[in-house]
């Protein structure tokens, strides 16, 4: 390819990403998967990232582009929207296209011919493990792929922000005490379907982060009232009986529902529940996803010690666990979540910050302390 790469991080990360897609696509084919996307070469990865990065820094009518690129030929893209004439892959062309393709689920299709990359149109349908590159904000790019099941959030592979490159650590889910929700976000041990109980928490996390107001979601054991020892009473927004619309949707059998209508209903219920986390205080659900309360204030349970330290990790290559005081991890919301999980060790807490950070708190028997999993790199 004749393109000259001027974004240094593109060259730094290209070989690792090439290897990732080659390995997982080969593994999928060996397991009998039929609709697997073609693997991008290192040069293709480098060129795509370079063009997208410089496009992210441009503006069209005062707006920064938010676009998604998918590397696959049009004949493998379902029912694509095809341009009558191919467009060269340039930052200028990407910026010009951006206003028309920034809605969620739309990908600009990119393919190569005679060593040159071109844009052939747009698509909403892509194959398993298709290389996808999202431009989220100026200077922020996310490499991801569609889950092999086709359901739920795409699995992130790498996050690039300026000269900072974070490669998702595929082995993070093998660490002791890793919560199932974190393993699911990693995408390599993805649940079987979009209504899998764990995967619903992933969708809730994505929706919580998306509203941008910050929030906290506590997940407590079904049938237990012990969590109320860590909450100030009376609860301002207690729900009685527990609201179970999401639970009922999850329990529906696939053969008894129209898939697209059901998924739409699931999204509405997930967004509605996640929206409550924007209210000051914590939203509380049980592990069957029944809503118990929102706007709840957390206190230290009687007789329990203060949470004086937590272990913080991030599922990226090269990350080392750090032990610190909860106040060093964030503000009041993070401190309250750490204290709640310290006292209610069979619960987990999902915390979104207004700046986009997202942390999942769980109790670690191995470390004998609260484990804070910073997972915003998995949610972009």
Image (tube, rainbow, N blue to C red):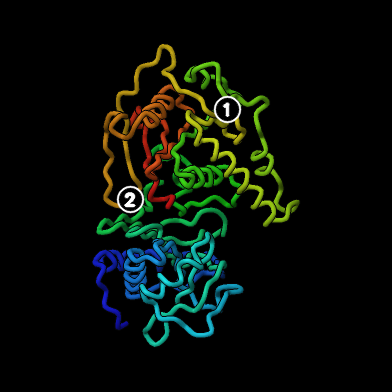
- Please say if the residues under marks 1 and 2 sit with CB atoms less than 8 Å apart: no
N-term-proximal mark, 1 vs 2? 1
Q: Residue at x 36, y 34 (%)?
A: 371
Task: Say if residue 25 shows up in the picture.
Answer: no
* Disc ID at residue 293: 1
Image coords of residue 316 (percent x, y): 33, 50
Work out whether residue 346 can be spotted: yes
Residue at which label 2 appears: 316
Q: From mark 1 to mark 2, how far is it between C-alphas?
A: 34 Å
Q: Is residue 255 above or below residue 313?
A: below
Q: Foreground residue, 250 or 55?
A: 55
Tell me: residue 264, above or below residue 20.
above
Q: Residue at x 46, y 69 (%)?
A: 70
Is 194 located above or below residue 350 in the figure?
below
Label 2 CA crowd tier, 10 Å (few <14, some 14–19, many 20+): many
Q: Residue at x 43, y 12 (%)?
A: 302
Find numbered disc 1 in the image and state the secondary structure of the residue it sits on.
Answer: strand
Q: Position of residue 319 (x, y in %)?
A: 28, 47
Which residue is nearer to you in this view: 206 or 195? 206
Residue at the bottom extreme? Answer: 114
176 left or right, relative to 200:
left
Residue 15: image location, x then y, percent: 30, 68
Callout 1 crowding tier (Cα within 10 Å): few <14, some 14–19, many ≥20: many
In the rendered view of the protein, which quadrant contains the N terminus? bottom left
Residue occupying image coordinates x 31% and y 35%: 329
Q: Is residue 226 above or below residue 162?
A: above
How many numbered marks does the figure carry? Answer: 2
């Amino acid at each position: 390819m004749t393109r000259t790469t001027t974004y240094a991080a593109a060259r730094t990360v290209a070989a690792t990403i090439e290897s990732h897609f080659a390995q997982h696509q080969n593994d999928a084919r060996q397991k009998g998967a039929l609709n697997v996307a073609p693997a991008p070469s290192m040069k293709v990865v480098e060129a795509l990232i370079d063009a997208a990065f410089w496009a992210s820094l441009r503006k069209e009518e005062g707006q920064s582009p938010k676009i998604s690129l998918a590397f696959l030929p049009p004949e493998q893209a379902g029912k694509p929207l095809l341009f009558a004439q191919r467009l060269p892959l340039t930052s200028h062309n990407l910026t010009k296209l951006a206003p028309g393709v920034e809605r969620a689920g739309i990908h600009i299709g990119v393919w190569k011919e005679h060593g040159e990359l071109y844009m052939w149109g747009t698509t909403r349908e892509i194959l398993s493990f298709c290389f996808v590159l999202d431009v989220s904000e100026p200077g922020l790019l996310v490499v991801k792929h569609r889950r092999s099941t086709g359901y739920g959030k795409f699995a992130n592979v790498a996050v690039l922000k300026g000269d900072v490159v974070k490669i998702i650590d595929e082995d993070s889910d093998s660490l002791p005490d890793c919560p199932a929700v974190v393993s699911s976000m990693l995408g390599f041990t993805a649940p079987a379907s979009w209504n899998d109980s764990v995967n619903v928490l992933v969708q809730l996390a994505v929706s919580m982060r998306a509203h941008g107001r910050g929030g906290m979601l506590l997940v407590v054991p079904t049938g237990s009232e012990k969590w109320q020892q860590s909450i100030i009473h009376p609860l301002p927004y207690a729900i009685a009986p527990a609201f179970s619309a999401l639970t009922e949707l999850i329990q529906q059998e696939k053969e008894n529902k129209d898939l697209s209508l059901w998924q739409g209903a699931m999204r509405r219920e997930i967004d509605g529940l996640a929206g409550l986390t924007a209210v000051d205080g914590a939203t509380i659900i049980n592990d069957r996803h029944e809503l118990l309360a929102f706007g709840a204030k957390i206190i230290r349970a009687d007789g329990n010690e203060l949470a004086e330290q937590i272990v913080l990790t991030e599922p990226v290559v090269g990350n080392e666990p750090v032990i610190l005081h909860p106040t060093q991890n964030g503000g009041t919301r993070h401190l309250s979540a750490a204290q709640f999980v310290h006292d209610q060790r069979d619960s987990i807490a999902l915390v979104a910050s207004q700046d986009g950070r997202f942390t999942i708190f769980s109790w670690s028997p191995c470390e004998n302390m609260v484990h804070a999993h910073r997972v915003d790199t998995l949610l972009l």
